Amino acid sequence: MTKALLAPPAVGAPDERAGDEWRDRPAAQQPDWPDPSALRAVVRQLAGLPPLVTPEECDTLTDRLGQVARGRAFLLQGGDCAETFAGTSAAAVRRKLETLLQMAVVFSYAASMPVVKVGRMAGQFAKPRSAPTETRDGLTLPVYRGDAVNGVEFTPEARRPDPGRLHQAYQASAATLALIRAFVAGGYADLRQVHAWNQDFVARSPVGQRYERLADEIDRALRFLDVCHVDLSDLRTVELFTSHEGLLLDYESALTRTDPRTGGRYAGSGHLLWVGERTRALDGAHVAYLAGVRNPVAVKLGPSVGADEVLGYVERLDPDRVPGRLTLVVRMGAKRIRDRLPGLVQAVTAAGAEVVWVSDPMHGNTITAPSGHKTRQFDDILDEVAGFFEVHHGLGTHPGGVHVELTGDDVAECLGGGSAVALDDLGRRYESACDPRLNRGQSLDLAFRAAELFRGPRGTARRSDPAGTA
Ligand SMILES: O=C[C@H](O)[C@H](O)COP(=O)(O)O
Ligand SMILES: C=C(OP(=O)(O)O)C(=O)O
Ligand SMILES: [Mn+2]
């Protein structure tokens, strides 16, 4: 993990005056807190606590993403749709990390590029929803908005928004981040170890034969380095950054701090924050909040977005054209990606912005199973990634990465994949508090299949270099 992340977070001074422009704008998807004075008390408490990440770490991530924007690195962003307080166990965090690291090795080898690893972790506790309420058997209650707001159980008590949960979200984020820092710094992420896990996956997978070639190539590369006595000790630690949707603006602004080095303001709740499909109004509060912090930021782009609107995000969030400051996360759906994406990429390229383009192949491909479970077909997910790569390869731009909802556990939430999760399996292990995640096997299936697609039929990585400097 990150040498950067190893530094203990500096305690920046809370700054309650600056950066409040968002307060004058409409903020979508905010909870209806029943007791505003309780909310104010929690916000005051949070404002006095240390930030979870440092400005230096956030700047490091911007640099890394700058490499992605310039076609020299690949971004892997993944984790739960909704983290839960109960899921903050050492074992669950470790399995998620293992999965991300295993995927990263595959992408890194296939793309011949460093992989920037960003977890949807240590802060992904709030959810935007399609409807404000949910009705079951004639009873209507507020919808679940993430553990930072209310409980997932369908009772009036659990569903009542409780600002005390914001403090719990801070604590759960701090605990998760401490686990991440410990795991990645402790030699646990040794490249040879991660590769051994991948070999184990290939050996056990019903479709493992398909992945043997790539796994064998990685094996040979590692053996070669070994016989050449290349010192692999530098590969015992990795960098891993955190990210979440910057949804609850009272929480985010309570943890925003001024960097004593530069006077710049940084979100202290995670390294990268994004605005979602439901909160990306250009003149809304969420975009205004992101515009006021120096962290790397991202915007989710759904099928209704137009090129002018995307240029609006570029102007508003990356006026200084800093490579890596802005990531555009495309989630169009497999059926639409090939039609919708080219015009957006061309417009942004023409505007001279060096953004990171990332495919979220999950959110445009959600369907409802006959059992009522939200689910996604593995083949649709892979097809959206394939379309994303095709569009970029066709335009000579860099398909910068993938953003996926996943878990390290053997859940049955998405359909298909190598071990073929079927509709009947959804009742067996559906544990997500919100959207369906790829399980560990499906995540690795996606990594191997997408990596093959990335490097194309000739088996060699296609490197685009929009900056023309490689
Ligand atoms: O990622 C989350 C979901 O897509 C989002 O919360 C909307 O879910 P919903 O349609 O079930 O409300
Ligand atoms: C809600 C999410 O995505 P989107 O805003 O793209 O729908 C999410 O990432 O969980
Ligand atoms: Mn989701």
Image: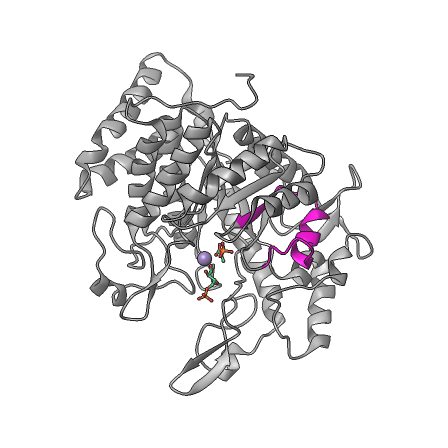
In the rendered structure, which segment of residues is drawn in magenta?
Answer: 279-300
In this rendering, the answer to whether 124 lies above or below 77 is below
Task: Identify the residue shown where x is 21% and y is 65%.
Answer: 424
Q: For this view, does 251 lie left or right of residue 422?
A: right
332 falls in the magenta region? no
In which quadrant of the rendered view does residue 5 lie? top right
Q: Quadrant of residue 432?
A: bottom left
Instruction: Answer with left or right where residue 392 lies relative to residue 408.
Output: right
The answer to which of 76 and 97 lies nearer the viewer is: 76
Instruction: Residue 131: give x, y in percent of width and height.
Output: 50, 72
Q: Position of residue 284 (x, y in %)?
A: 68, 58
x, y percent for residue 175: 54, 54
Tally of marks: 0
> Going 57% across and 48% down the picture, which residue do you hit?
299
- Residue 334: tell me if it is visible: yes
Tell which of 56 and 90 is nearer to you: 56
The answer to which quarter of the image holds residue 374 is: bottom left
Would residue 193 be visible to someone looking at this image? no
**Identity of the residue furthest to the bottom in this view:** 138
Q: Is residue 195 above or below residue 247?
A: above
Q: Is residue 396 left or right of residue 296?
A: left
Q: Residue furthest top?
A: 228
Q: Is residue 141 left or right of residue 190?
A: right
297 magenta-colored: yes
Q: Give x and y (percent) for residue 19.
A: 77, 52
Asked which colour scheme the image uses, the reply is one colour
Choose between 454 and 230: the one closer to the eye.
454
